Image (spheres, grey):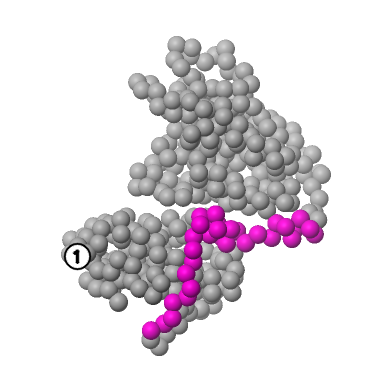
């Protein structure tokens, strides 16, 4: 991080694109302040749909909880689900325990913005963010009455005193509205002012964490994600030939697995004939769990040693003319990113095969870079 530059993270989770539009407006307001840079990142999706992949924000890099401590200010954005933030954002924030133990976010200014659907529960949802940020000791920057005199009062607007929201479900009008984007930019500018003022003081007061806090914070992040996602990594399958479960060459680990579960093939046969695409996805999920189980063994039980998921190649037992290979393999890719964050993004191939050993519907070949 450049010491003489104030850097503010705009972190969002979006499914339909409304929160992303607000995030861009927040970032625009942040950069109105001289010497302040906005960095746009998104939260990894627990389950990313094909529709989400088609949105413009699909190319925005994923953030990791650990990197939050690098910034001088933080803006958090999410859609509203039943008066709360999305499960994806909640899962991400639950991963900031290590930062809390080291008090890394104490005194960092933060603000919140949300896509509010029809508007029900938007204040409660904003405050659900605030409670987590307050536990971290962050300095909360609300919107108050900023922009109230300038907004278009002929249309319903989602703005609140706690933070900007957009009434995304309002029919017949473009959302976020011009007024909602206007207030979002003001909110970003207000955050930037506070971040710029506090950044020199925070750097001056920065001190090494105590040994106790360092020990408390030494969390194996991928293992924590495995627990948070309630993934059960199976026991290592025994090789049935003259080979090993994995091979290592330098810093690269090579793994091949099929859809075995408790010693039996899960949904054997040809995808689209003997099993549905939903069953194929479940088999792919199980195959990727088997890959992760072997990877844990290859890293001596420490998945944090994984530096990068390099390549996933899926071999799918499919009939001639089958075209949904990518949709099935997305399950494995999403799981890699869910566990490893940005390090989980990888190159990939999905290949149709006329048969696969033990009549498995899928086989995954994976390459990882490890420490």
Which residue occupies 66% across, 39% down? Answer: 133
- Residue farthest to the bottom, as pictured: 242
Q: Toward the viewer: 252 or 142?
A: 142
Q: Is residue 339 left or right of residue 269?
A: right
Residue tagged 1: 319
Instruction: Give the image location of residue 116, x and y in percent.
Output: 48, 29
Quarter of the image with the C terminus in it? bottom right
Work out whether residue 89 or residue 274 is closer to the camera in this orientation and state it. Answer: 274
Q: Residue at x 64, y 40 (%)?
A: 132
Quadrant of the rendered image containing residue 281: bottom left
Rendering coords of residue 343 (x, y %): 52, 59
Is 207 displayed left or right of 195 in the figure? right
Q: Is 238 in the magenta?
A: yes
- Residue 357 relative to residue 165: left or right: left
Examine the rendered structure and indicate whether residue 156 appears above or below residue 87.
above
Question: Could you tell me which residue is drawn at 55 percent across and 54 percent down?
Answer: 228
């Amino acid at each position: 991080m450049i010491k003489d530059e104030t850097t503010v993270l705009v972190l969002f989770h979006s499914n339909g694109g409304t929160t992303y539009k607000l995030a861009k407006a927040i970032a625009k307001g942040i950069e109105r302040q001289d010497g302040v840079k906005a960095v746009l990142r998104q939260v990894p999706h627990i389950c990313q749909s094909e529709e989400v992949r088609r949105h413009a924000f699909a190319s925005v890099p994923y953030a990791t909880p650990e990197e939050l401590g690098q910034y001088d200010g933080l803006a958090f954005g999410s859609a509203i689900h039943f008066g709360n933030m999305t499960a994806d954002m909640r899962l991400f924030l639950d991963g900031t325990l290590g930062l809390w133990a080291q008090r890394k976010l104490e005194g960092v200014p933060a603000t919140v913005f949300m896509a509010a659907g029809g508007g029900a529960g938007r204040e409660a949802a904003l405050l659900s963010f605030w409670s987590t940020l307050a536990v971290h000791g962050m300095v909360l920057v609300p919107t108050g009455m900023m922009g109230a005199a300038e907004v278009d009062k002929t249309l319903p607007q989602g703005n609140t005193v706690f933070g900007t929201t957009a009434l995304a479900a309002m029919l017949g009008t473009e959302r976020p509205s011009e007024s909602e984007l206007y207030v979002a930019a003001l909110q970003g500018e207000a955050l930037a002012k506070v971040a710029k003022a506090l950044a020199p003081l925070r750097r001056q007061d920065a001190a090494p964490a105590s040994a106790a806090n360092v020990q408390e914070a030494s969390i194996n992040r991928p293992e924590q994600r495995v627990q948070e996602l309630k993934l059960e990594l199976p026991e290592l399958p025994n090789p049935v030939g003259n080979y090993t479960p994995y091979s290592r060459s330098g810093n690269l680990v090579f793994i091949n697995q099929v859809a075995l579960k408790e010693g039996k093939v899960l949904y054997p046969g040809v995808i689209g004939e003997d099993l549905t695409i939903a069953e194929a996805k479940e088999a792919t999920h199980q195959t990727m769990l088997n890959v992760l189980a072997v990877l844990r063994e290859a890293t001596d039980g420490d998945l944090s040693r994984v530096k990068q998921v390099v390549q996933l190649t899926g071999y799918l037992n499919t009939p001639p003319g089958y075209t949904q290979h990518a949709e099935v393999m997305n399950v494995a890719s999403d799981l890699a990113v869910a566990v490893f964050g940005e390090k989980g993004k990888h190159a990939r191939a999905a290949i149709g095969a006329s048969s696969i050993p033990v009549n498995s519907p899928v086989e995954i070949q994976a390459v990882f870079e490890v420490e």
